[in-house]
Amino acid sequence: MLKIKVISGENIDRALKRYRNKVKSTKQLSTIRANNEYTKKSKAKRDQRAKAVYLKDYKLRMEE
């Protein structure tokens, strides 16, 4: 559970923005979505390898 301290006199929109940024930076939402259903270890490894290949190709294309 994330906690955001609201400073006295602070706009509620600003506090919500800080909350959203904290959720994004801690990757909390992605872990919740990942835990919704079971993923086989072989599928997780396959996805991880595919991501690594994509990032490698992307970095090579950006260097050109």
Image (cartoon, rainbow, N blue to C red):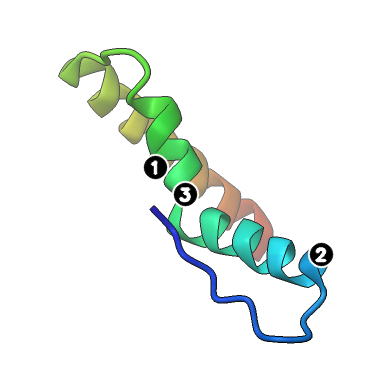
- Which tag is nearer the camera, tag 2 or tag 3? 2
Question: Disc 2 and disc 3: Cα gap in Å?
Answer: 39 Å
* Residue at numbered disc 2: 13
Residue 61, above or below 3: above
Choose between 9 and 21: the one closer to the eye.
9
* Residue bearing mark 1: 52
Q: Are the residues tagged 1 and 3 within 8 Å (C-beta)?
A: yes
Position in image of residue 9 (x %, y %): 78, 86
Please state the horizontal and vertical placement of residue 13, each as a whole percent of the image. 81, 64
Label 2's element? Answer: helix
In the image, which is nearer the foreground, mark 1 or mark 3? 1
Within-10-Å neighbours for mark 2: few <14, some 14–19, many 20+: few
- On screen, residue 56 above or below 10: above
- Specify whether residue 64 is in view: no
Q: Can residue 11 be seen in this view?
A: yes
Quadrant housing the C terminus: bottom right
Label 1: few (<14), some (14–19) or many (≥20) C-alpha neighbours in 10 Å: few
What residue do we see at 49% from left, 40% from top? 29
* Position of residue 51 measured from the top left corner of the image (x, y, whole percent): 43, 37
Residue type, numbered disc 2: Asp
Q: Name the residue under label 3.
A: 56
Above or below residue 3? Residue 7 is: below
Name the N-terminal-most of marks 1 and 2.
2
* Distance of label 1 from label 2 (alpha carbons): 37 Å
